[in-house]
Amino acid sequence: MAPGNTAAAASPRPLPSTGAVTGVLEALAFFRDGDFARRRFERFGNVYETRLLGQPLVFIRGGPAIQALLTQPEASEGWWPASVKQLLGSRSLANRNGADHRARRRVVGQLFSAAALRRYSPGIVALVNALAAELAAATAAVPLVDRLRRFAFTVIAQVVLGLDGGDRDALFADFEIWTRALFSIPLAIPGSPFARALAARQRLLARLGEVLERARQQAGQGLPLAGGLDLLSGGLDEAGLPLTDDDLVEQLLLLLFAGYETTASSLSCLLAALLQHPRELAWLQEELDALPWPPAPGEAATADDAAAAPRLAAMVQEVMGLNPPVGGFFRRTTRELVLDGVAVPAGKVVQVALAASNRHGPEDADMSLQADDLEQFRPGRHLGEGSGLTLLPFGGGERVCLGKALAELEIRLMAVGLLKQVRLQLAPDQDLSLQLVPSPSPRGGLLVTAPARTA
């Protein structure tokens, strides 16, 4: 049994280390080896330190370590790699901490309230129907990952922010450039992914600023605003001061990411898993066939929840457990923390390894079952009393992903609406392995054919 799997001792243990000096080889392994964290957890325990390209990182897994971190928010703060910090911007709430972070989060969070989701639901249903119709009419295999990414982006850009087609298409092209460099080496060498992303960021901010100004002019003329921008237009921070335009624009850039990347990844992984497991798909289809589509007017935001569709909820949990849309999230300790019996000094950057935690299982589980059972695709484990796993697919604590509620709504509506209208089939001879950065999705694009369902 690896160290760290027993109950915490009376006095904390020192922090284990891989001994990496420069972290170059560790970084290469991190990006190439899907089992990077698991291999080191097995050797060093549930909490250990290594170094990636000169940056010391403490990796943690398992319920005890993660809960100890999240239940002491005053002992840590948000942290991102340098590439993410620069591309998000200094004003972004992702790069703020304490009261400053909470104030911006309260304002921006209005875009994802229950009332806002009810407003967005008809638009999301229409986009699901449009994709189903496109797939049913296609005469050749369609790369579903691309369509799902466009769907998720259109929801956040058009339905939530109210952008028109021209703005949306230009934003999408630049946003894809920006997203691909989020977790890259932050060297702005001409022609490098990071340099292209910085240029795309400037174009994104300029276009979002134009959108914000148009929304302000429309509001001044008494015209209704599309999407939810009216929820932001009067937003005040906790000091009672309006957010500046530069501040709001950087929050909108974060919203595009929060409401897009994780959703696209989750949808891609869900449909890829279902199409590779026809027995589980048939099991889910029995439930979906009994659900109405489209949802009754005014009910789309709460339709198909865990109470109405427990198999769908279990399926989503299983997919997110095996391939969470966020592979991990970061915190920096502001004082010493004891995580699963290990003393982590102040000033350490901690990465919560979600996929490794989900495959490791609860500490009191039968250890003989963990290695095999948790790697299996078995959504039924989440029914009844549940799996006992600590699943945090959108992060956790007070910095949980802002787009979580919107993503969950999109996933439910897409799963029900798409699978009730078309019967998806995998095209042969494609690469279904997952690329992991910035979020998991099938490398081959998830090529599908979709003949119309018959009654």
Image (cartoon, helix red, strand yellow):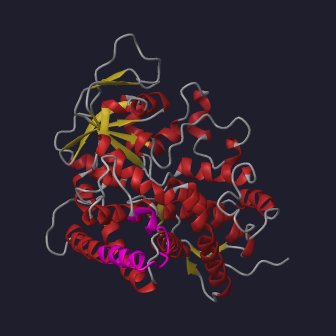
**Image position, residue 158 (x, y; %):** 48, 75
Magenta span main SS: helix
Observer-nearest of 389 and 230: 230
Image vertical order of residue 40 relative to residue 286, above or below: above
Observer-nearest of 209 and 233: 233
* Residue farthest along the left direction in this orientation: 189
Going by the image, does 434 lie left or right of 280?
A: left
Image vertical order of residue 318 relative to residue 406, above or below: above
Residue 349 visible in the shown view: yes
> For residue 367, what is the image quadrant?
top right
**Image position, residue 290 (x, y; %):** 82, 62
**Image position, residue 116 (x, y; %):** 55, 61
Q: Quadrant of the C terminus?
A: bottom right
* Residue farthest along the top direction in this orientation: 10
- Over which residues does the magenta segment extend? 209-233
Residue 435 visible in the shown view: no
* Residue farthest along the right direction in this orientation: 455
Observer-nearest of 88 and 315: 88
Going by the image, does 183 lie left or right of 298?
A: left
Q: Residue at x 48, y 49 (%)?
A: 394
Observer-nearest of 406 and 420: 406
Q: Is residue 223 magenta?
A: yes
Q: Is residue 345 magenta?
A: no
Q: Residue at x 60, y 60 (%)?
A: 409
Q: Residue at x 28, y 49 (%)?
A: 80
Give the number of marks.
0
**Image position, residue 298 (x, y; %):** 69, 65
